[in-house]
Image: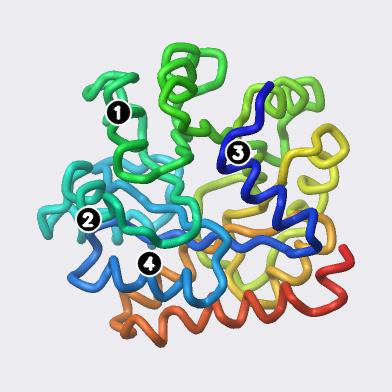
């Protein structure tokens, strides 16, 4: 399987000894959401995951659900989010995260082409099982958009092997069973998932769902290639923090990942 532009970018940084951080920003959440994207890039993000709001975000916990609801109430749509990012020239890859209803309604090829035209090089569609994703993956491949698959703590080894063959860009390891959300402590399963997946692939392996602090990121990066930071960042926005204060979370995670102990993981 050929490496996508997203995979090549992340792999090159990882192979140079860098641990990866991918912040998540809900597209259309408030007037300053694009400024937040710029701020997390400046804070050291290696890619940015952009949530395209959907009314029934089934794998997301209360924070991302609230963020999506607010964005939708403010008039955000897939078209407005993609339009705001088109030709943004951020300097790092963009990864869309949304649900299959939006993909299906637009059509696989059209949705993938729209993502590519807006500058996206990856997509996460978590409610579309890989066994049913053939048409979407074909459309994404044609557009040069990496379709990223998830591995959960209970995923059997045989299924992990199938997922790492079919994923593009990176493998998204889920730290715990359940929905996204901030957590005071990161489960031991986060490191276990990272080790299990890395034993079966040379693709970058990032861990998300509950990575809420710099210490969480540093700990999981002893086994993983990096982390996805989502709900903790969006909680700051929902609680009224300005862009610079919210982005301090990513600055702290970047600093923790750049420590020698994390870099040696």
Query: In the image, residue 29 lies at what x, y percent?
Result: 24, 63
Counting the numbered discs, the total is: 4
On screen, residue 117 above or below 207: above
Q: Is residue 199 left or right of residue 154?
A: right
Work out how far the residue at label 3 is from the one at label 4, CA to CA, in angstroms: 20 Å
* Quarter occupied by the C terminus: bottom right
Mark closer to the chain start, 4 or 2: 4
User: Are there few (<14), some (14-19), or many (20+) residues within 10 Å of tag 2?
Assistant: some
* Residue at x-position 72% and y-position 60%: 187
Q: CA distance from mark 3 to mark 1?
A: 18 Å
Residue 37 is marked as 4
Q: Which residue is mark 3?
A: 169
Q: Which residue is mark 1?
A: 111
What percent of the width, then of the height, locates residue 141? 49, 22
Q: CB of mark 2 within 8 Å of CB of mark 3?
A: no
Q: Within 10 angstroms of label 4, few (less than 14), some, or many (20 or more) residues?
A: many
Residue 191 sits above or below residue 135 on the image: below
Question: Residue at position x 31%, y 27% from top?
Answer: 103
Question: Dot 1, crowdedness within 10 Å: few (<14), some or many (≥20)?
Answer: many
Q: Quadrant of the N terminus?
A: top right
Circle 3: element type = loop
Cα distance, mark 4 to mark 1? 22 Å
């Amino acid at each position: 399987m050929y490496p996508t532009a997203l995979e090549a970018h992340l792999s090159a940084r990882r192979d140079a000894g860098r641990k990866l951080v991918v912040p998540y920003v809900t597209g259309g959440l408030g007037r300053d959401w694009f400024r937040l994207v710029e701020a997390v890039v400046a804070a050291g993000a290696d890619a940015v995951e952009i949530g395209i709001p959907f009314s029934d975000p089934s794998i997301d916990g209360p924070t991302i659900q609230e963020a999506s609801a607010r964005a939708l109430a403010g008039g955000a749509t897939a078209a407005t989010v993609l339009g705001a990012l088109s030709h943004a020239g951020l300097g790092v890859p963009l990864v869309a995260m949304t649900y299959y209803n939006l993909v299906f309604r637009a059509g696989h090829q059209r949705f993938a082409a729209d993502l590519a035209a807006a500058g996206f090089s990856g997509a996460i569609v978590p409610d579309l099982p890989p066994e049913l994703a053939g048409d979407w993956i074909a459309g994404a491949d044609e557009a040069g958009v990496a379709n990223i698959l998830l591995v959960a703590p209970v995923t059997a080894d045989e299924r992990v092997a199938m997922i790492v063959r079919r994923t593009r860009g990176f493998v998204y390891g889920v730290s715990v069973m359940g929905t996204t959300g901030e957590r005071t402590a990161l489960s031991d399963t986060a490191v276990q998932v990272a080790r299990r997946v890395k034993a079966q692939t040379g693709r970058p392996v990032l861990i998300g769902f509950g990575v809420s602090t710099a210490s969480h990121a540093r700990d999981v990066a002893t086994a993983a290639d990096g982390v996805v930071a989502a709900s903790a960042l969006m909680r700051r926005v929902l609680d009224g923090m300005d862009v610079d204060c919210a982005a301090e979370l990513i600055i702290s995670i970047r600093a923790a990942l750049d420590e020698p102990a994390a870099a040696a993981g």
